[in-house]
Amino acid sequence: MASKNLKSLLKSDFCENKNLLQIIPVAAIASLMIETAICVKNISEAVNELASLANFKPPDSNGVAKNSSNDEISHVISINGPTLEGAIVQNLTLKVNQIEQEISVFLSFALFWRHSNMSEAQRRPMAVSIKHHNGNINGSIPLRSPSMVSEVDEFCHALGGKNPVHSILIANNGMAAVKFIRSIRTWTYETFGTEKAILLVAMATPEDMRINAEHIRIADQFVEVPGGTNNNNYANVQLIVEMAEITHVNAVWPGWGHASENPELPDALSAKGIVFLGPPAASMAALGDKIGSSLIAQAAEVPTLPWSGSQVKTPSESCLVTIPEDTYREACVHTTEEAIASCQVVGYPAMIKASWGGGGKGIRKVHNDDEVKALFKQVQGEVPGSPIFIMKVASQSRHLEVQLLCDQYGNVAALHSRDCSVQRRHQKIIEEGPITVAPLDTIKKLEQAARRLAKCVNYVGAATVEYLYSMETGEYYFLELNPRLQVEHPVTEWIAEINLPAAQVAVGMGIPLWQIPEIRRFYGMEHGGGYDAWRKTSVIATPFDFDNAESTRPKGHCVAVRVTSEDPDDGFKPTSGKVQELSFKSKPNVWAYFSVKSGGGIHEFSDSQFGHVFAFGESRALAIANMVLGLKEIQIRGEIRTNVDYTIDLLHASDYKENKIHTGWLDSRIAMRVRAERPPWYLSVVGGALYKASASSAAMVSEYIGYLEKGQIPPKHISLVNSQVSLNIEGSKYTLNMVRGGPGSYRLGMNDSEIVAEIHTLRDGGLLMQLDGSSHVLYAEEEAAGTRLLIDGRTCLLQNDHDPSKLVAETPCKLLRYLVVDGSHVDADTPYGEVEVMKMCMPLLSPSSGKIHFQMSEGQAMQAGELIARLDLDDPSAVRKAEPFHGSFPLLGPPTAISGRVHQRCAASLNAARMILAGYEHNIDEVVQNLLSCLDNPELPFLQWQECFAVLANRLPKDLRYELEAKYKEYEGISNMPTVDFPAKILRGVLEAHLNSYPDKEKGAQERLVEPLMSLVKSYEGGRESHARIIVRELFEEYLSVEELFSDNIQADVIERLRLHYKKDLSKVVDIVLSHQGIRSKNKLILCLMEQLVYPNPAAYRDQLIRFSALNHTNYSELALKASQLLEQTKLSELRSSIARSLSELEMFTEDGENMDTPKRKSAINERMEALVSAPLAVEDALVGLFDHSDHTLQRRVVETYVRRLYQPYLVKGNVRMQWHRSGLIASWEFLEGHVDRNTWV
C-alpha cells in the first residue's frame, strides 16, 4: 500500500536525519498520511498511521529523541471537522488527482533528499528521478499545507471562479518561463502570503540543462523532455499533454512562440480536464491564422490594408464557424503567377506572407514582378504547407498595439496601448507605451475595434491586436491578432499596473474580470486595495459595463528594449554560446529580467532574445533617458554578441527622440550601415595588441611549464619580451613592435611613433588597460571571424585573414536550402543560400563573384567554421586585402600619473633597474642617470622619511610620534640645502631609546612596528653615499643570485636543478630563465653602476666584486674583467695607504716615539724607505699615486723612494737630492761610472 511505503520511507530515511524533520512539519506528514489512506480506500489504515505518528519521536537539533506534540496531529484532524471521521469524509471530496499529486511530490522530495545526502558511491546504483513515459520528474518541492490548498480554493470560489488552480506546467523556456514564474511568485505572495501557493513545473531539454537555464533553477519542479528543435519538446502538443498528466497539474501556460498558437493544444488539454491558460481552440484557430483573422476583421468592420482577400466577404455571424474552404482559398495565392497578379492589384511595394509564419519566417518584401518570381518560392519553403497571401506595404507607418484581456463571460478589457515601430526584419527591438503619436480619440477607436474583434469570436484570455497607423493620413489598419501574451507585455503592466500572467491564471480559474481587484482598480472601481484584500473585494464587487467604463490614465511612460544575442555588425545574425558574465544594476525606474545568468549560455535551439529591459518615466523623454542609463549598466561577456551598444545608439538618434520613426526606420539605418559607436581607433589597436601579446606570452609560459611538469628539457629560449603583432581592423592592417618593460608594462612602436601602456589581469579573465593616464576594461572572445574585443562596453573585431574562396558557417546553424544551382555563377553580395539560426531564417551572401561548388547538403546542421561551399573566384587578384596603415599614434602621455617628487622618481628608476635585472627592457642610460641624480639629491631622505612616517604615524605610540615629529621638523625646512645632512643618527637615537624603554617581552612587537623607519635611518647614517651603496649592493645581489647559477654550468643542467628545487611553483623557474635571457642588458646596467658608483670606492664592494670576477663564461667576460680591475684598484688603494702611513711622520709617534730624538727618527724613516726600495711587491704604481700628496714631507720621501727603487743598482749611494722650485719638487741623482749620463734630474 502507498501509505506503508510512505511510513517505511519516513522511518528508514527521514528519522535518521535531524535536519530533515525541521524542514517537513509533522502536520504536513499527517495530512499526507490521511490523503494517502483515503486514496487507497482504507480508513482504518489512516487511523493506524495517525496513531503511530502520535508516538513518533524525531531527534532534536542535538540528535536527542523528543516526544512529538500530539497537538499537531489534532490540528490536522480539526481542520476539516471535530472528529477523525469528519476529516476523512471531507477529505474524500478532494479530487483524486490532487491527492496523487501530493504523494508524487512527497516521494520526489524524499528521493531528492536521500540522493543529496549520499556519498558518490552510494548514489550510483540509485535512480535520482521518477521516470514516467518520456519525462523525468526532478527537483525538491516543499510540501504545501492543506490550509494553503484550501485558501486557493476559497480565493477562487469567493471571486466567482469555478476551477481552482494549484499547479501549473510551463510549456515554454527562456524569457517566457522566467517572466511567468516571477510574476506568479509575486502575485501569490501578495495574495496568499507565500510565493509557493501555486506549484510551478518547468519543462527542461538537455540543452537547457547544459547551459544552466534560469527557468529550471527558479521553478518548483522540472520535467525533462527530449532535446533538439522545438517540435521535439515545447511545440510538441502530445508531449506537453503527457507531461501535464505525469505531473498532475491543474493548468498549462503556453507562453509565446512554440505551441502557444496551436489550436490542438487547448483541445487536447480540455479532453484531459486540464485548464489551458489561453483562448479556446475555436477562437485561436479563427484569429491565430493571419488570413482567417483578416477575414474576420473585415467582417467585424475593422479596417484592413489592401490585400489578396480584400474582395472576400464573410458575414459577422459566421465568425466562429469554420470559414468555408472556398472563401479561405479565395483570399490566398497559390502560384507565382497569382502572386504577381495580386501584387499588381494591391500595388507595390507589397509583402508576400505565409499565414503560419512568424518571427521573421515566411515574409518577404517585394518591389516588382521579378522579385516576386525570386522570393515566392522562398516563402513557400520557409513555412512548408502554409497558405500564402499578399498584403500592401504601408510605408512610413507605425506599428501600434492594444492589449486585451477577456474572461469566460464575454467581458473584454482594453488595457491601454503600445507602440512597437522600431523593428528589424519585422522583429520588434524597442517597444513603448502608451501610444504618443496618435490623438486620444484615435487610440479609443483602436481599443474599441480590438474589443469588437475579440467579442466576435468569444475570445478568452490575453491577446494583442496589432495595427498599422499612417502618420500622414491618421488612418489605421488591422494587421493581426496574437492569441497569446506578447513578449512586451511588461510595458502594459507598468503603465496599467496589472500583473498580466496573474490575470491569465485568474481568468483560467473562471473568475470574471469585474471581480479581479487589479482590473477594478484599472477602471476606477472600488477594489479593496488589491489582491491582498481579495476577501473584501469579493464582498463589495459588482458587475459593470466594460463597453462604457472609462479606464484610468496610463501611469507615465515605459520604454522596453529586447536584449538579443545578435551581432549588429553582421546583419544581426544570431549567435550562441557560453555567457561568462551577465550583470545588471537595477535603478528605481529601470527593471530587467534575463533567461540566463553568469556561467550559463544560449544554445542553438534558443530564441535569440535572452533579456528584456524596461524603463519608466513621467514623460517619454525621461523614460528614454532612464533606459540609456540602464543599458549602460549591463555587462555581458561570453561567446555571444549582443545588440546593447547598438540599441543605445538608436535611443540617442534624433529621429527616435523626436518620435519620427516608422516600421522601416531601423532597416533603413541597417541598409545605410549605420553602426554602433566604436572605440577610438588607437584604443582598439593598443587594446588588441596588448591582448594578443599577453595571450601569446601566457601560452608560451604555459607551454614551458608543461615541459617542466613532464620532466622534459624545454626550449633554450622563451620569447617573452620582444614580439611583433599584426592586426586587421576594418580593412586596415596595423603592425606593431612590442617590448615589455615589466610583467604588465609594454612599449608599443608603430611607424616611428611610440607609446607606453600597462595591463593588469582581472580575476574574471579581463584586462585592465592603462593608457594616457586613463584606465579601460578590456575583454576578448575568439570566434570564427576573428577576435571580438569589448573595450569599455564598446566592441570591435580583430579580423582573421579571410579567404573568399572558402564559404564557411560563422555560427551554428542549419542549412535550409540553396538559392542557386551547384556549379553556377554567383555575383558578389548576392544570396546563394539560406540558413536557420536560432529559429530565424538568414541569407548567405557570396563575398566575391565566381563559380560556386557546394560542400554541404541541404537540411544539414553545421557548426561555426564548417565549410559550406567553395568559390572559384573570377579574379583572385581583385580580392580586397587589408591595407597597411602608415599613420602614427596620437601624442599620448604616460599610462599613469607620474609625480615629479624626487623620492617617487627614485622609486620608479629603481623599479626600472630591477625590471632590467628580471629580463625586461628599458633605456639603461636613462635609468642609471635618473637613479644617480635622485640618490644625490639632498631632499631624498627627507621625502622618504615623510612617506614612511605617514604610513606608520597612526600606529606609533603618541609620545614616540611627537618626539620624532619634533626632531624631524628641526631639519625639514632646510632639507633642500646641499650642506644639510639628514638627521639619521638623531632619529635612530630616538627610536632606540623608545625600544629600550620596553621590557623584553614587548620589545619584539615594537621592533617590528618601527622596522621600516629604523631601516631607513640606518641606511643614511653614513650619509647619502651610504644609502647609495646599500641600493647598489641590492642590485648587484639580484644579478648574482641568478647568474651564479649559470656560471660555468650547462643551461639544461641548471634548469633541471631548478625544476627539482621549485617543483611546487615552476613559474619561478620561468622567472629565472627569463632573467638570464636578458644577460646583455643586465651586464650593461651593472657596468654602468660600477663605473658611476663603484669606481670611486671599490673597497666598499669588495666581496661582490670578487664574486663578479669569478663568473666563468663568455657572457660575463667584460663584466668579470671590470670587476677584476676594480679589485686591483682596491689593492692599489690599500697599498698607497700603507705606504703613506709607513713614510709619514705620524708613524713615528709610537709608544716611545714621542721621546725619540731626531737622529733616531730619521734613521727609522730611512729604514722604511730602504724596505720599500727592496720590497718584492710591485709598489711603483702606489708610489706614483702619492706624488701629489698634500703633505710635502711625505711627497718628498715618496719621490726619493721611487727614484731609488727604480735605479737602485745604478745610483751613487746617498746621491738623491730633493729641492723645491716654484714649478714643483725637483729630484736629482748621480749614476755610477759606466753610464753615459751621470747627472740626471726630474
Image: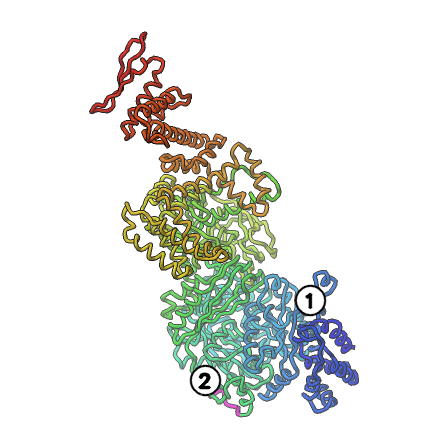
Side of 338 where 972 appears, left or right: left
Label 2 sits on a secondary structure element that is loop
Picture quarter containing residue 621?
A: bottom left
Q: Which residues are magenta?
A: 540-552
Q: Position of residue 914 (x, y in %)?
A: 43, 44
Residue 848 visible, this angle: no
Q: Are marks 1 and 2 in contact (CB under 8 Å)?
A: no
User: Is residue 1028 part of the magenta span, yes or no?
Assistant: no
What residue is disc 2 on? 551
Q: For the C terminus, which image quadrant? A: top left
Q: Position of residue 1110 (x, y in %)?
A: 48, 32
Residue count near mark 1 (Cα–Cα under 10 Å), binned few <14, some 14–19, many ≥20: few
Q: Amino acid at mark 1?
A: Asn
Q: Is residue 245 above or below residue 382?
A: below
Q: Amino acid at mark 2?
A: Ser
Q: For the N terminus, which image quadrant? A: bottom right
What residue is disc 1 on? 117
Label 1 sits on a secondary structure element that is loop
Front residue of 215/469: it is 215
Q: Is residue 1024 above or below residue 640?
A: above
In this view, the residue farthest toward the top is 1234
